[in-house]
Image (tube, rainbow, N blue to C red):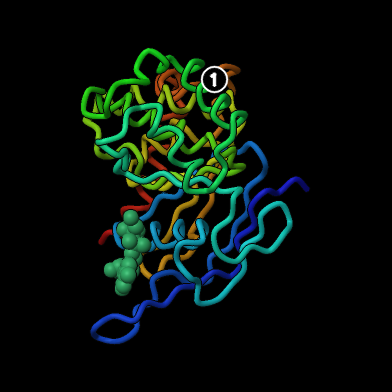
Amino acid sequence: MNEILEVKNISKKYQGKEGEILAINNVNFSIKEGEFVSIIGPSGCGKSTLLSIISGLEEKTTGKIYIEGEEVNGISDRIGYMLQRDCLLEWRNILSNTIFGLEIKNKISKESKDYAKNLLKKYDLYDFIDKYPSELSGGMRQRVALIRTLTTKPKILLLDEAFSALDYQTRIMVTNDIYEILRKEKITVLMVTHDISEAISMSDRVLVLTKRPGTIKNIHKIDFGIENRTPINCREKPEFSKYFNTLWKELGVDEK
Ligand code: ADP
Ligand code: MG
């Protein structure tokens, strides 16, 4: 079918000081185009490892990654990656930060710059293009970081705890904001989080990993049956606490 990402038998061994550490073991899953999928699991179970392998920044020990049916080794143009820190460059203004992703990928052209500017306009940042990151709120900085990633037109966006540096109130607003941008731009998303509510509020499916070595323990389909679903409005649905309890229990077993 229209599977955009396939992860097959991925394992990763690190060489630690005291010998080998098996971080993840035999991870298998796939994602369909347009889906929003989250990964949750106990701290240290290999979530970041899995994401950096998919991004191509970290080598895998075994297994294969396919994007749109093609095997990929290393960094792919079709993947965007966002981390907890927004990694904006303090000495560059917002416009120059936004096109930085294009610069490092050698994709600066009039067309690509116009695309970046249009995204800034579309998402209410155009008035800030001459400002510097320190002049923006945490939420706005995260929006700039997202737009910088989107300028290179990735098919799949990887988010690793991208909102966890923000305080609770801001985080709720920012996830709502970012979710709407991602839906409008029709980006497929794979997000790692330790926050069960965040995972439920944004995802079509949640993958639960076991403790280290991380492997898929369960996959939950999340469906609120509402048409214009947002991370905020689905929190009021009775299904929300039902999903929360299920996932909480499933993670709790491993924390003991
Ligand atoms: P998570 O993101 O789920 O908290 P990580 O993927 O960061 O987990 O780490 C999984 C395991 O692999 C941890 O035990 C961690 O200590 C180990 N690990 C991560 N990166 C390295 C590395 N570069 N070298 C050695 N061990 C590592
Ligand atoms: Mg991590």
Q: Is residue 67 above or below residue 35?
A: below
Q: Residue at x 25, y 61 (%)?
A: 256
Q: Residue at x 53, y 65 (%)?
A: 27
Q: Residue at x 50, y 71 (%)?
A: 60
Q: Quadrant of ligand 1?
A: bottom left
Position of 166 with respect to 236 (left or right) is: left
The disc labelled 1 sits on which kind of residue? Asn
Where is residue 126 shown, x and y percent of the image?
Answer: 42, 16
Q: Which residue is mark 1?
A: 118
Position of 227 with respect to 125 (left or right) is: right
**How dense is the environment of label 1, judged by Cα within 10 Å: few (below 14), some, or many (20 and up)?**
some
Q: Nearer the viewer, residue 108 or 159?
A: 108
Q: Is residue 100 above or below residue 74?
A: above
Image quadrant assignment for residue 129: top left
Q: Is residue 23 above or below residue 92?
A: below
Where is residue 121 shown, x and y percent of the image?
Answer: 48, 15
Q: Residue at x 59, y 37 (%)?
A: 153
Q: Is residue 39 above or below residue 98?
A: below
